[in-house]
Each structure stands twice: as structure tokens, then as C-alpha cells.
Image: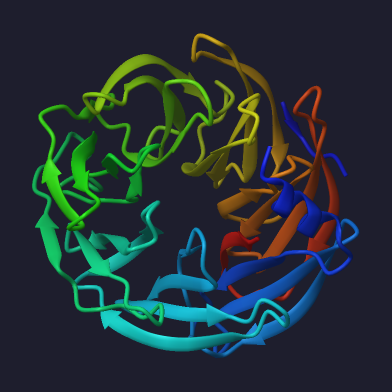
Amino acid sequence: MLRFTMTFTLTFLSIWAFSQGPFITVSSSGNDNIAGLYVYRLVDDQLELIEKSGAVQSTGYHNFHPNAPFLYAVGNNKVYALRIDENSGHLTLINEQDSKGGPCYVKVDESGRYVMVANYGGATIGVYPIGRDGGLLEMQQSIQHTGSSIDTSRQKEAHPHLITVSPGNKYALVPDLGQDRIMVYTFDEASGRLTENKFMGKALPGAGPRHLEFHPSLPFVYVVNELNSTVTSYRWDNTQGKMDQIATYPMLDDQFNEFSKAADIHLTSDGQFLYASNRGHNSIAAYRVMNDGTLNAIDRYSCGGDFPRNFFITPDNRFLLVANQRSNNMAQYAINQKTGVLTLIKDFSDIPGALCIKLHR
């Protein structure tokens, strides 16, 4: 049934407690949009709009540097490096580089020395060194993906959809929607070079793996599959970079036969709950995470808009924020930390093509 209902470091916790609050950024992907990023401040459970930034126009996914005031975004076949003023939240463009394809995801490695990009269009992944000023140096490595799978409309060729690093920065993982594979690369932190690992994760034929996230404390990784709207749990071996399937879970009701494509996946920072978004069905599926890596379904909740892409869980696990691309809004939910139940508490409208939400702590 679709229901519509209205531990980090001491330093971070103290920042969170101050009235100043951390900054939350939202990518805006509207056509000809002059403000590519919206900046909010979280103050006493409320989000206050600080800036509609024109530093870049019409962005897709973005991510922050792990320990410096830099933000990296993709859009318009570019990779952008920006600086965020930690007092005002103002964004300033440092520089940009050609993405060498149609970019859909950007990530900074744990060392903070390299930016990694996945190009859905062109089927490549790339690595850029970060300069001293936070700017992007020229791409130092590009890897071409090849392959296909059974869906003749979406899987005629490879489509890398995300790139991220494993805990400890030892491997880079890339869900490839076109191949029904999660490619695994060893990552040399000293040089920033990627080398294809002998192991890879396999998805069910036609599943279309899109995004993934590691459990914060247990050896599991969870993948959301776009084409069949499912979530698959894997056991993760960090010594070999090996993924072994545990089980696959539906995100939709059995009776639902209309258009729906899964988009994003995240766990709470304590690893108790997992959420995944469905476009078309316009819902957030919620699960309780068990100690053996399996999932128990909790419920499905309206996303508070149309076409939920990325969503974000605040580090204290109190709120879940959803970017609804076609309804141009962001919905804020309270998370019941005992049950995982979501309750809609506020809507933020007029964010053209809202797509990706991140927090600068």
C-alpha cells in the first residue's frame, strides 16, 4: 500500500547543535536554469534558503570534498570544482574540465586527492587529480566500458551510472546499468590509478544496477536496480574486492504494472534502515536491515512530488530529504528512529529540476 503521511565526530555534533547549522545544497537541472545549485542552512530543524547560486548552471549530481570546503558537480558535459564559503554558504566556481562523455555521477576519494566521474553517455569513467586550490587538473585516466544485456531498449551498450570507493579507499565500484554488472577496480591512492579487479558483482538479467551504498559497519553492500525496481544485497569482501549476492527485494506492489524506474539508495548512519526511491511509482521504499545483510520491508511512502531522483539522510538520522525532479520541489521527512517510518513535515517548491541533495558539514 502506498502511504502518504504528513555517530559522527564531536566536532560535527557540536556544529550540528549550533544555531548556525550546516549547509545543504540541491542541484537544479531545469532547462536554461541560471541557478544550478540552491544552498540552504539547517537551523533548528528548519531549512532556510541562503542562495540560488549562479556559479554554475543546470547541474546534475554533486558531492563535497571529505575534509575541505570544495564541491564537485557534473552537468552540461562538464565537471565543475567550486568553493563554498563556510560562513555564508556562498559558492564560487574554481574551474571546470571536460567530462569526456555524458556525466551522471561524481565522487571524491577518501584521501581527498582525486575526483572520479561516471559517464552514462559514452560509457566511460574518469579520474581527475585535485589541485592545491581545490580545482580540477586534467583527466589523468579514462576507462571505456563495453558490453550489453537483455533489455534491447536500455541495455544495447554499457552505461556506468555511479562511481564510489569502498571503505578504506582500496576499491572503486561502478554499477553498469547496460551490462547488469557492478565493475570493481583496485584503487592506488598514491597514483590515483584504477585497475580492473578479477571479481565483479553480477545483477539479475535486465535488472539494470544503478546506485549502491555500503553498510556503515557490517560487510554488506546494497544496490538499487533501475530497470526492475529492486534492491539487491551483497556480502562484501574488502580483502579481495568481491561481491556475493545474498537476496533481491521488490520495491513495488505486485499489482503495480505502470511505468516505474528505481533511482537512489541510502542507509541511515547507524545501519538500521535502508531507503530506495522509485520514479513513476513516486515512492520511497523503506526496509529494516538485519545483521545477516537481509532486508525486511517496512512500507512504501509517497515521495511528496513527482519523479524522485536523489535523496539524502541527515547524519543524525532525523530527516530524509527527497529531490523531486518533475515537480520541481524538495520534500522533508522526519524519520522515526525506532521504526524507520517516514512522516512528511515540509515541502520546498520552486527548485527547477531538483535532482541531488548533499550536506556540507
Question: Does residue 18 appear anywhere in the picture?
Answer: yes
> In the orientation shown, which residue stands out farthest toward the top?
292
Q: Position of residue 238 (x, y in %)?
A: 31, 26
Q: Position of residue 232 (x, y in %)?
A: 41, 24
Determine whether, in the image, residue 91 is placed left or right of residue 299: left
Which is more toward the observer, 204 or 198? Answer: 198
Q: Quadrant of the C terminus?
A: bottom right
Determine whether, in the image, residue 135 is placed left or right of residue 186: right
Q: Position of residue 336 (x, y in %)?
A: 82, 31
Tell how many labels.
0
Q: Quadrant of residue 81?
A: bottom left
- The residue shown at (56%, 11%) is 291
Q: Position of residue 260 (x, y in %)?
A: 49, 42
Question: Does residue 157 appear anywhere in the picture?
Answer: no
- The residue shown at (37%, 21%) is 234
- The residue shown at (34%, 50%) is 162
Determine whether, in the image, residue 155 is placed left or right of residue 226: left
Q: Quadrant of residue 24?
A: bottom right
Determine whether, in the image, residue 322 is placed left or right of residue 127: right
168 to 128, vertically: above or below: above
33 to 206, vertically: above or below: below
